[in-house]
Image (tube, helix red, strand yellow):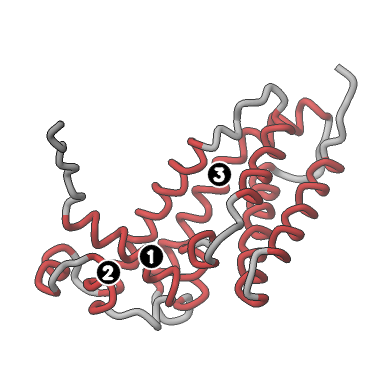
């Protein structure tokens, strides 16, 4: 049977995919355009055809990572629960499930970039903030529905969504500090228990 050739991603997409890998592993300051070109299999001429600079690439890579992350969580189907509380718990379970393998593969590009360049690269910092807030906003409707269903108040859906994301980012830092996912997993299990206590099951 003849083999069907799989089309390669276009050059810009290859550079962005490579940037996600390299920047997550080495950080912004520890990465060079040469590193990213080598990982993408492109020339520097091709790089500068698509991006003005490493900073321009980092801004685009933050947006590219956000799209990739949302697609990943759509595939994990954590919203397949009737109770919004259970959807939030399933989201955290999905976060725990992906904490395995190489640290650079399960941690967040946005968090890594902003920690590395928040004081020196305002455009990168802003792109990372946009991505983090966008992901948190995806939790807000389920938090609002859980608050209504379980009679919980005293905070805003936005505030809790950002808290959840902040704990996740902190778990990634702990994974990097300890050289593995175990403490990060424990951190997210504590977050899960907090959500369980916050939205205690109520009689139907």
* Crowdedness near tag 2: few (<14), some (14–19) or many (≥20) residues, C-alpha within 10 Å: some
Residue marked by disc 1: 21
Residue 15, located in which quarter of the rendered image? Answer: bottom left
Q: Dot 2: what SS? A: helix
Residue 151, located in which quarter of the rendered image? Answer: top right
Instruction: Say whether residue 190 is left or right of residue 44.
Output: right
Residue 145 lies, with reference to residue 42, above or below; the image says above
In depth, the one of 148 and 94 nearer the eye is 94
Residue marked by disc 3: 137
For the residues labelled 3 and 2, the Cα–Cα distance comes to: 32 Å
Which circle marks residue 39 in the picture? 2
Q: Are marks 3 and 2 in contact (CB under 8 Å)?
A: no
Residue 55 locus on image (x, y percent): 30, 73
Instruction: Say whether residue 67 is left or right of residue 50.
Output: right
For the residues labelled 3 and 1, the Cα–Cα distance comes to: 25 Å
* Crowdedness near tag 1: few (<14), some (14–19) or many (≥20) residues, C-alpha within 10 Å: some
* Crowdedness near tag 3: few (<14), some (14–19) or many (≥20) residues, C-alpha within 10 Å: some
In depth, the one of 167 and 38 nearer the eye is 38
């Amino acid at each position: 049977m003849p083999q069907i050739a799989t089309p390669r991603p276009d050059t810009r997409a290859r550079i962005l995919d490579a940037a996600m890998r390299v920047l997550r592993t080495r950080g912004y300051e520890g990465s060079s355009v040469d590193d990213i070109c080598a990982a993408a299999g492109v020339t520097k001429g091709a790089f500068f055809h698509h991006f003005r600079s490493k900073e321009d690439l980092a801004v685009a890579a933050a947006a590219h990572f956000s799209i990739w992350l949302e697609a990943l969580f759509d595939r994990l189907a954590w919203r397949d629960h009737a109770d919004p509380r259970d959807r939030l718990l399933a989201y955290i379970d999905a976060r725990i499930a992906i904490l395995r393998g190489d640290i650079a593969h399960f941690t967040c590009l946005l968090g890594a970039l902003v920690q590395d360049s928040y004081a020196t690269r305002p455009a990168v910092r802003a792109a990372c903030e946009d991505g983090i807030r966008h992901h948190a906003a995806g939790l807000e409707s389920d938090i609002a529905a859980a608050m209504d269903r379980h009679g919980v108040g005293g905070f805003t859906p936005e505030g809790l969504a950002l808290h959840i994301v902040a704990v996740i980012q902190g778990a990634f830092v702990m994974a990097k500090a300890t050289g593995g996912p175990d403490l990060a997993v424990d951190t997210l299990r504590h977050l899960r228990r907090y959500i369980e206590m916050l939205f205690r099951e109520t009689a139907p």
